[in-house]
Image: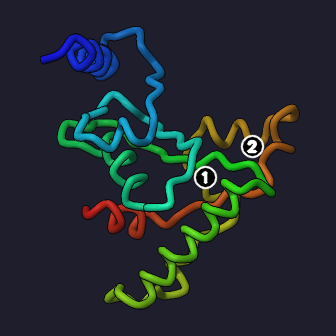
């Protein structure tokens, strides 16, 4: 095992250790799509957008592994009016169309993302959205239905 791979695995092991002081692990989407396990994670925050949605799903799935005991929240942070935001919207539309064509459920209306802060279960995100100095940053917060989230990860 090369030194770089050994160092990376040591960082991952430290992050996953329940007694560790490590609270944040920064990694690229590409690095996290390569068979690592991040059961120490409680949140996955995506800062970039991949054209291939399966790359993002694989990266997110690093936290949804055997041994995960925490609820894991996933966020995509996007800046409105940017190419990244446009790319994400096109990707989401492609995914929605794919579900309409290939899903056995044929995308019932109750499976549509909801745009309401009242349904946010993550206490930290809820506090951020309501915080006087931060609330204007959030133009939109889309809450995906749980059933659909887990189906997209193969659960």
Residues tagged 2 and 1 counted as in contact (Cβ below 8 A): yes
Locate residue 10 relative to residue 77 in the image: left or right.
left
- The residue under the point 45% across, 88% down is 100
Residues at marks 2 and 1, CA–CA distance in whole angstroms: 10 Å
Q: Is residue 18 visible?
A: no
Q: Quadrant of residue 20?
A: top left
Give the numbered dot on residue 65: none
Q: Residue furthest left?
A: 1
Locate residue 14 relative to residue 144 in the image: left or right.
left
- In the rendered image, which quarter contains the N terminus? top left
- The residue under the point 42% across, 13% down is 22
Q: Quadrant of residue 7?
A: top left
- The residue under the point 53% across, 43% down is 46
Badge 1 marks a residue whose secondary structure is loop
Give the numbered dot on residue 120: 1
**Residue 80 position within the rendered picture, expressed as x and y whole percent measured from the top left:** 78, 54
- In the rendered image, which quarter contains the C terminus? bottom left
> In the picture shown, does residue 68 fall above or below 8?
below
| Residue 15 or residue 68, whichever sits in front | 15
Badge 2 marks a residue whose secondary structure is helix
Q: Quadrant of residue 136?
A: top right
> In the picture shown, does residue 16 fall above or below 62?
above
Q: For mark 2, what is the residue? A: 129
- The residue under the point 57% across, 76% down is 93
Of labels 2 and 1, earlier in sequence is 1
Q: Residue furthest front?
A: 2
Q: Is residue 141 visible?
A: yes
Query: Mark 1 Cα within 10 Å, few/some/many (few <14, many 20+)?
Result: some
Locate residue 54 relative to residue 107 in the image: left or right.
left
> In the picture shown, does residue 123 fall above or below 138?
above
């Amino acid at each position: 095992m090369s030194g770089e791979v050994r160092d990376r695995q040591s960082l991952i092991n430290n992050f996953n250790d329940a007694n560790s002081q490590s609270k944040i692990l920064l990694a690229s989407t590409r690095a996290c799509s390569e068979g690592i396990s991040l059961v120490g994670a409680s949140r996955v925050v995506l800062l970039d957008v991949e054209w291939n949605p399966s790359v993002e799903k694989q990266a997110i799935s690093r936290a949804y592994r055997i041994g995960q005991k925490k609820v894991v929240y996933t966020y995509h942070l996007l800046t409105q009016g940017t190419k990244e935001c446009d790319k994400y919207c096109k990707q989401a539309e492609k995914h929605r169309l794919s579900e309409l064509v290939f899903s056995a459920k044929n995308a019932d209306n109750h499976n549509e993302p909801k745009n309401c802060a009242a349904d946010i279960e993550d206490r930290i995100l809820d506090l951020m959205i309501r915080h006087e100095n931060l609330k204007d940053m959030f133009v939109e917060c889309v809450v995906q239905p749980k059933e659909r989230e887990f189906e997209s990860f193969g659960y």
